[in-house]
Structures are given as C-alpha cells and as structure tokens.
Image (cartoon, rainbow, N blue to C red):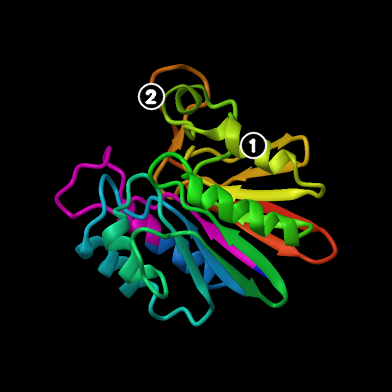
C-alpha cells in the first residue's frame, strides 16, 4: 500500500500577497505530479489556508480534489479554522473533535489535531486508549511532536505541550511512525521509539539555520510512503 502526504499548501485568497510565489499554481503542479503515480490514499497534514481558513478557500481546495477517486484524509493546521474546516473535510463534522482513526487496506492510521498549537487533555486520553490496542503505529499530525533542528520553528512555533506528548509516545512498547508538516522543511528525526518524518511544504521551505524567519528554498515537494513488512518513505521534489 502506498500513501501520498501533502502538507502546508497555504492556499491564499487571490488578492493576498505571498512573497511572489504562485501558491495556487504550485498546488496544481503537485496534483499533476501525483496523478502519474500509483497510490491508495492521499493525506493532507494541515495548513490548507494561507493565513486563516475561509469557506471560499476550502471550497476551492475541495473542487480541485474532486476528480481524485482515492480516499483523501485531512487534518487541520494552526492556520486553519476548525469551525469552517470540519464541514468541508471531515465526516460527522464537529469543530470540537477533529482527531480520528481510519483504516485503509488493513492498516490503521491515527490523525491528531494540533490546530490550537497543542493537544488537549481529551485528545491525549483518546490517544492513550488507542495506544493500548495497537503495535506498530502510524500517526499523521500537523506539528512535529519534538524539536527538529529548524531553529526558527523550534524557537517560535513548536508544539506547546510536546514534552507531554512525547512522554506518552515514548511509553509505547513499539515503534511509532509520525508523519507531519508545519516546519516547511523535509527532515527525519528519531526520538527513541518515535520516528518523525517531516513533509516539505508546497509553498516554500524555511532556512533551518537562524532564529529569524528566512526562506531557504522555493522548491516544493510531497512525501511518498510505502507500507509492507516495513515502512519506506521518500520526498519527491518537483
């Protein structure tokens, strides 16, 4: 089974200024690229909207994806509006519960909600319950659950209660594979049993060095994940 992960597409209103980057064109290029691949599901790991979510932006994304027949899963990012995001992209929509579990071809995935920049107590309790019944676990979330060596993001935009989340994940007896975005940088980090894979953005990539924001690259890409007896993953740049 193969899953494509796309993250941080940051679709703007057409009047918004975006560092002279054609974000909507980039999104179309990504969709054209994945149309040539064989895959079984598509996952968007948050920040669908440029600065803040709107019905118009979510309707545009929904329309652009309408020709894709594969299962598509979404989780919100910190730039999304939970109230507007839910009815467009989630079944049984509720803006108060945006985390969920799905199974594709006998492989179960957990989708966490970090749109408020932290994971609340109810979601942590749900996660602990799910961990009790699962072994080699795959989690999709927007924020990485640990620091990742991108200085600007680690300093200013890390998950607020990541130590608490990491302690929950570290207590699990098996490997946990986390696929996330948010950092606008392709990277892989291992923290004990937790293997973190950061997907690049389709907007820009952040310079990993320095405490001030700087664009490191305008190259865009997505992540291809293959599940068999092991998990293999690669970033595809276009």
User: Which residue is pictured at 38% across the width and 24% down the height?
Assistant: 213
Q: Residues within 10 Å of mark 1 (few under 14, many from 20)?
A: some
Measure how far apart labels 1 and 2 are at the Cα level: 26 Å
Which one is in front, 6 or 113? 113
Inspect this view and state whether residue 20 appears.
yes
Q: Is residue 150 rendered to the left or right of residue 226?
A: left
For image coordinates 32% across by 51% down, the residue present is 80
Q: Nearer the viewer, mark 1 or mark 2?
A: 1
Between discs 1 and 2, the one toward the N terminus = 1
For residue 216, the mark is none
Within the image, what quadrant is residue 227 found in? bottom right
- In the image, the segment drawn in magenta is 3-27
Query: Which residue sits at x=70%, y=50%?
Result: 177
Which residue position is annotated with label 1?
A: 166
Q: Position of residue 181 (x, y in %)?
A: 51, 45
In front of the other: 90 or 126: 126
């Amino acid at each position: 089974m193969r899953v494509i992960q796309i993250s941080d597409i940051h679709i703007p209103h057409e009047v918004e200024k975006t560092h002279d980057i054609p974000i909507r064109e980039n999104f179309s290029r990504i969709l054209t690229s994945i149309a040539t691949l064989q895959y079984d599901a598509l996952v968007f790991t948050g920040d669908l909207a440029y600065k803040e979510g709107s019905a118009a932006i979510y309707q545009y994304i929904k329309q652009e994806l309408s020709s894709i027949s594969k299962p598509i899963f979404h989780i919100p990012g910190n730039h999304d509006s939970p109230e507007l995001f839910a009815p467009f992209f989630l079944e049984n929509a509720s803006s108060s519960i945006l985390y969920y579990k799905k199974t594709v071809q006998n492989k179960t995935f957990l989708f966490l909600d970090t749109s408020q920049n932290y994971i609340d107590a109810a979601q942590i309790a749900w996660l602990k319950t799910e961990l009790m019944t699962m072994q080699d676990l795959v989690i999709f979330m927007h924020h990485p659950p640990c620091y990742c060596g991108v200085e600007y993001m680690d300093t200013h935009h890390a998950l607020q209660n990541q130590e608490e989340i990491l302690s929950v994940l570290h207590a699990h007896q098996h490997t946990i594979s986390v696929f996330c975005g948010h950092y606008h940088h392709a990277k892989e980090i291992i923290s004990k049993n937790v293997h973190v894979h950061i997907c690049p953005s389709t907007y820009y990539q952040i310079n990993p060095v320095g405490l001030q924001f700087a664009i490191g690259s305008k190259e865009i890409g997505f992540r291809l994940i293959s599940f068999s007896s092991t998990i293999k993953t690669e970033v595809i740049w276009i």
